[in-house]
Image: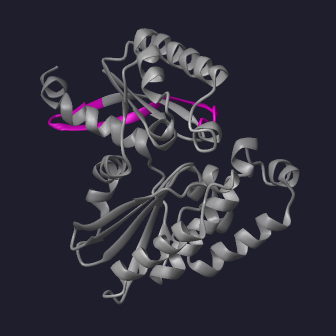
Amino acid sequence: MRFAAIDIGSNAIRLLIADILRKGVQVQYSKNTLLRVPLRLGDEAFVKGEISEAKFEDMVKTMRAFRDLMDVYKVSDYMACATSAMRDAKNGKQIVQACRDVGVDIQIIDGSVEAKIIYNAYLSGVMDKEKVYLYVDVGGGSTEVSLFAKGELKASKSFNLGTIRILDGQDTPEIWQDLKEWVKTHTSDHEEVYGIGTGGNINKLSRLVNNGVDKAFGYKKLQGVYEHLKSLSLEERIFDLGLRSDRADVIIPAAEIYLTIMKAGKLRNIVTPRVGLADGIIQQLIRKNYVEIISN
C-alpha cells in the first residue's frame, strides 16, 4: 500500500510518496519518492495579494503531474495541504478549484492545523514529559511557535513572519516585537526550555552548524553560521556551500527568525528531527486507514 502527501508551501511544493509497512498491528512508512518544485508562490501572494496567471498555470501543471505520478505509483490515498501563500492569495479558491479539476483536492490550512499535523507525526512520541519544549516551524509566509510542558500543548501561535515575507520587505518591526514578546511571556516561568525546529531551512542550518551530524546546537553556534552566511554572496552560498538557489537566499532570514526566538526564550539548545508537513500528512493517512492496513 502507498500513500502520498502534497505540501504546498510559500517557497516550494513537495510530493512525498511513501510505502506503508506493517508488522502485526504495528505500522510505519518508508519514503519511496520525494519531489520538490520551487514555485515560490509567496513572492506574489505576499506582495500583490494574488498569484499571477503564469504561476497559476504552473501550479495546475504541477498538480496534474503529481496526479499522474500518484496514479503510476498506485497510491491508495493522499492528502494535499496548502499553507500561508494560498491563504493570503485572493485567487486561492480559484486555484483550488482548477487543481480539483485535474484530480487533486487541496485543503488550505491555517498555522495551528499545520503545527498539530507535524506534532502528531513525530513530536508527541519523543518529547520527555519532564521537559519544556518550544516547537518552531519557519516557513516562507509564517512562523508557528508552540509551547509544550509535561507532554501537553500549553500555548500556540502563528505569526505572519516568514522567509519570503522578509525578503519581499513585508515584515514589520511590530510583528518582530510581537514574536519576541510572545516567546518571552510563555517561557519566562520555566528554568530550562529546549527547542525543536522543523523545515528545510533549519535542517540545512543544522547540517552547517554540525558538519552534517544530527545533534542539538546552541545559540552561539547558530550565530556563527549566520554571520558566515551573511559574509558570502548569493553565488558563494550556492557554489561554495552547495545550497540550492531557492534556499541560498531564504536561509538567512530563517536564521534570523530562529536566533530571535532562541534569544527571547533563552533556549538551552535546539534539535532538528527532519520531519515536516508531508511526514505529518502520511502519519495522518495511516491513522485514517489503519483498520484497512492491518486487515490486509
Magenta-colored span: 21-41
Is residue 239 rendered to the left or right of residue 83? right
Q: Residue at x 67, y 76 (%)?
A: 223
Is residue 250 rendered to the left or right of residue 107? right
Corner quadrant of residue 294: top left
Q: Residue at x 65, y 76 (%)?
A: 221
Corner quadrant of residue 230: bottom right
Q: How far across and down, in percent of the image, does residue 238 sit?
A: 81, 48
Q: Is residue 89 above or below residue 247?
A: above
Is residue 204 rendered to the left or right of residue 143? right
Whether residue 279 is visible here, answered yes or no, is: yes
Quadrant position of the C terminus in the picture: top left
| Magenta run includes residue 237 | no
Which of the pair 217/6 is nearer the observer? Answer: 6
Is residue 197 rendered to the left or right of residue 115? right
Q: Is residue 56 above or below residue 186?
A: above
Q: How far across and down, in percent of the image, does residue 129 sit?
A: 23, 72
Q: Main secondary structure of the magenta part?
A: strand
Q: How far across and down, in percent of the image, does residue 1 sit?
A: 30, 21
Which of the pair 43/24 is nearer the observer? Answer: 43
| Magenta run includes residue 30 | yes
Q: Residue at x 36, y 40 (%)?
A: 109
Whether residue 267 is visible here, answered yes or no, is: no
Q: Is residue 127 above or below residue 114?
A: below
